[in-house]
C-alpha cells in the first residue's frame, strides 16, 4: 500500500476507536513519525493531507525540515540532549519528551532568545523500565511545578511510552494511568499549566490509546513501513 493509502486506513481506524471511546474523532491528531525515512516520504504524506510529523533525532530533523517545502508542523518526540536544543529552537511546534528540569531550562533559554514560548509535554515513565526516558510518576508534580516557573515554556500535557506488548491490550493500563495522572496534575491547578494533550499510542496500540483519551498518537511504521536502521 502507498503512504496515502496507509494514512487513510489509519485515519479511519482512529475515527472508529474514538467513537468506541465516546470521543470526538477531531480531538485526536495523528503525528506521522518519519524518523529514518527520507524527506520524499514526508512530502508524499504531506501531499496526501498529513500535516504533523514527529522526529527523534536533531540532525535528521534539521536536515529533513530544510528539504520539505510543504507547510507541515514538526514535533520532537525523541530523547533530547540539552546541548542540541538550540538547533531545534523555533523549528518545532511541540516537544513531547521533556523529562527533566535542566532540559526545560535550556528550552526556556533558547526559545526566550527568539522572543517566543515553547510548547512542551512532560514524558512520564509509568512502567519504570530503566531503558525508557521519562520522569517517575512520583516526581511528576514536582517537575511540573518547577517547569511552570519558566517564562518561555508552556506545559500542554503529558506523554508516555508503555512497554512493548504483542497484544495492544497490554498497553491499555498504561494509557489509562497517564490519563489519570493528567487529571491529578490538572486538579493541582498550577498557574500556566494546561493538561490538554495526551501523547500516547504507536503503530501497534494507537486504537487502545485513542479509546483511553489520546489527543496525539505517534504512528510511524504503519504509515511509512518498517524502519531499517543502518
Ligand atoms: C519511533 C517512535 C514512534 C513510532 O513507532 P511505530 O511503532 O513505528 O509507530 C512513536 N513514538 C516514539 C517516541 C518513537 O520513538
Image (cartoon, helix red, strand yellow):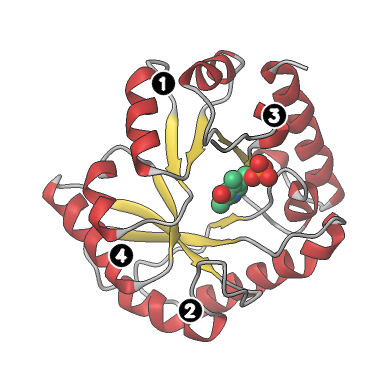
Q: Which mark is residue 71?
A: 1
Q: CA distance from mark 2 to mark 3?
A: 34 Å
**Which of the 4 image quadrants contains residue 108?**
bottom left
Q: Look at discs 4 and 2 and give the one toward the viewer.
A: 4
Q: CA distance from mark 4 to mark 2?
A: 15 Å
Element type at mark 1? loop
Q: Are marks 4 and 1 in contact (CB under 8 Å)?
A: no
N-terminal-most mark, 4 or 2: 4
Q: Which mark is residue 41?
A: none
Please state which of residues 83 and 230 is positioned toward the viewer in this rendering: 230
Q: CA distance from mark 4 to mark 1?
A: 28 Å
Q: Which residue is mark 4?
A: 103
Label 4 packing within 10 angstroms: few (<14), some (14-19), many (20+): some
Q: Are marks 4 and 3 in contact (CB under 8 Å)?
A: no
Let me know if residue 161 appears in the view: yes
Q: Look at discs 4 and 3 and give the one toward the viewer.
A: 3
N-terminal-most mark, 4 or 3: 4
N-terminal-most mark, 1 or 3: 1
Spot the residue most to the bottom: 138
Q: Is residue 41 above or below residue 147?
A: above
Q: Which residue is mark 3?
A: 225
Question: Does mark 3 have its CB less than 8 Å from ligand 1?
Answer: no
Q: CA distance from mark 4 to mark 3?
A: 32 Å
What residue is at 32 percent from the left and 23 percent from the top? 66
What residue is at 39 percent from the left and 78 percent from the top? 143
Q: Which residue is mark 2?
A: 140
Q: CA distance from mark 2 to mark 1?
A: 34 Å
Q: Are marks 2 and 1 in contact (CB under 8 Å)?
A: no
Amino acid at each position: 500500500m502507498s503512504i496515502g493509502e496507509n494514512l487513510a486506513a489509519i485515519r479511519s481506524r482512529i475515527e472508529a476507536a474514538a467513537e468506541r471511546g465516546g470521543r470526538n474523532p477531531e480531538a485526536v491528531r495523528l503525528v506521522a513519525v518519519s524518523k529514518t525515512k527520507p524527506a520524499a516520504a514526508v512530502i508524499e504524506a504531506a501531499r496526501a493531507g498529513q500535516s504533523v510529523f514527529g522526529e527523534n533525532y536533531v540532525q535528521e530533523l534539521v536536515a529533513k525540515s530544510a528539504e520539505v517545502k510543504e507547510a507541515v508542523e514538526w514535533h520532537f518526540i525523541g530523547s533530547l540532549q540539552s546541548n542540541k536544543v538550540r538547533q531545534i529552537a523555533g523549528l518545532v511546534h511541540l516537544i513531547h519528551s521533556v523529562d527533566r528540569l535542566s532540559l526545560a531550562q535550556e528550552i526556556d533559554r533558547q526559545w526566550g532568545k527568539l522572543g517566543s514560548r515553547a510548547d512542551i509535554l512532560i514524558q512520564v515513565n509509568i512502567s519504570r523500565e530503566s531503558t525508557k526516558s521519562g520522569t517517575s510518576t512520583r516526581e511528576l508534580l514536582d517537575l511540573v511545578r518547577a517547569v511552570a516557573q519558566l517564562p518561555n515554556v508552556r506545559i500542554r500535557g503529558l506523554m508516555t511510552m508503555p512497554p512493548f506488548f504483542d497484544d495492544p491490550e497490554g498497553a491499555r493500563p498504561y494509557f489509562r494511568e497517564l490519563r489519570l495522572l493528567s487529571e491529578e496534575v490538572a486538579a493541582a491547578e498550577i498557574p500556566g499549566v494546561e493538561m490538554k494533550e495526551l501523547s500516547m499510542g504507536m503503530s501497534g496500540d494507537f486504537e487502545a490509546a485513542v479509546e483511553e483519551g489520546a489527543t496525539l498518537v505517534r504512528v510511524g511504521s504503519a504509515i511509512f513501513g518498517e524502519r531499517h536502521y543502518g
